[in-house]
Image: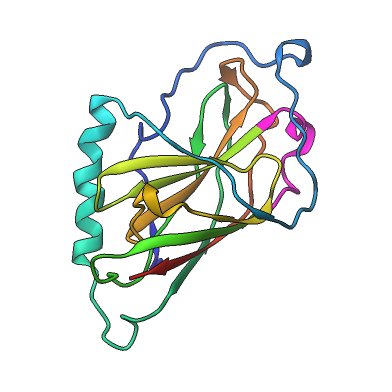
Amino acid sequence: MPGEIAIPPGVGFRVHFQNSFPREPEIKRRSVPSDASISGNKMLTQLILSPEEQGVLPTLGGLSIARKTDPSESRLAKWTGSGPGPVALGGGQWINGVALCPEFQIPYPSRVASLTWKWDTSRLGEWQRFAELRLMILDLEAKSCWTLDVTSTPASTTIVPENSGLSANCAIALQLKAGERIGKLYSPPFVKSVEVAVRYRF
């Protein structure tokens, strides 16, 4: 589907499986409201990638170069995307949903001014109190990675500081982690859908 790319395995998380599953006393409790609409500033955190993960970024970066530049779209100040969210088949690890990106190449230089997102909370089930969710943002020009905690804000907007230098040519994926114990989950939580809107300046 246009505007979507699959993040290769290993980007942003490592997978480990054991013959165990999370039990409530050992799991960090989280509060995930069923609805939220909050605007303000949330903290972007730069994610330090392993050498293997760093090696994937040039491949992702090539995707933005391959996209066509549509002259009629080149002055747009916003791009949007939507797609399926993550399914946590295992606990204690960050699981990616589909990565969303612009359908056209945004002329250089561009800088993200704000991020708006909305993700569906209805399918977290019994894991709702224990789930952690974050946006993983891959800057395809700078080959860097940022995260934004959205556990308590299923629908919100945040202002991105100009000094972050985050390019509008980026890929964004919602990540889900169910508890702290590593192992297979028999009632896996998942996010049915996620929407993002990226406002940017030239």
| Rendered location of residue 182, percent (x, y) | 56, 16
Determine the residue positioned at 24% across, 39% down.
56
Q: Quadrant of residue 51?
A: top left
In this view, 153 is above or below 109: above
The residues colored magenta run 119-131
Q: Is residue 35 left or right of residue 133?
A: right
Q: Quadrant of residue 181?
A: top right
In this view, 59 is above or below 195: above
Determine the residue positioned at 77% across, 38% down.
125
Q: Residue furthest front?
A: 163
Q: Residue furthest bottom?
A: 72
| Rendered location of residue 12, percent (x, y) | 40, 33
Residue 181 is at least partly visible in this image: yes
Characterize the magenta stretch by its predominant secondary structure: loop
The scheme the figure's colours follow is rainbow
| Rendered location of residue 57, percent (x, y) | 25, 42
Residue 6 is at least partly visible in this image: no
Residue 18 highlighted magenta (yes or no):
no
Determine the residue positioned at 52% across, 58% down.
115
Q: Quadrant of residue 30?
A: top right
| Rendered location of residue 83, percent (x, y) | 52, 59
Q: Is residue 185 left or right of residue 143?
A: right
Determine the residue positioned at 31% across, 72% down.
104
Q: Is residue 43 left or right of residue 76?
A: right
Quadrant position of the N terminus in the picture: bottom left
Quadrant position of the C terminus in the picture: bottom left
Count the marks: how many? 0
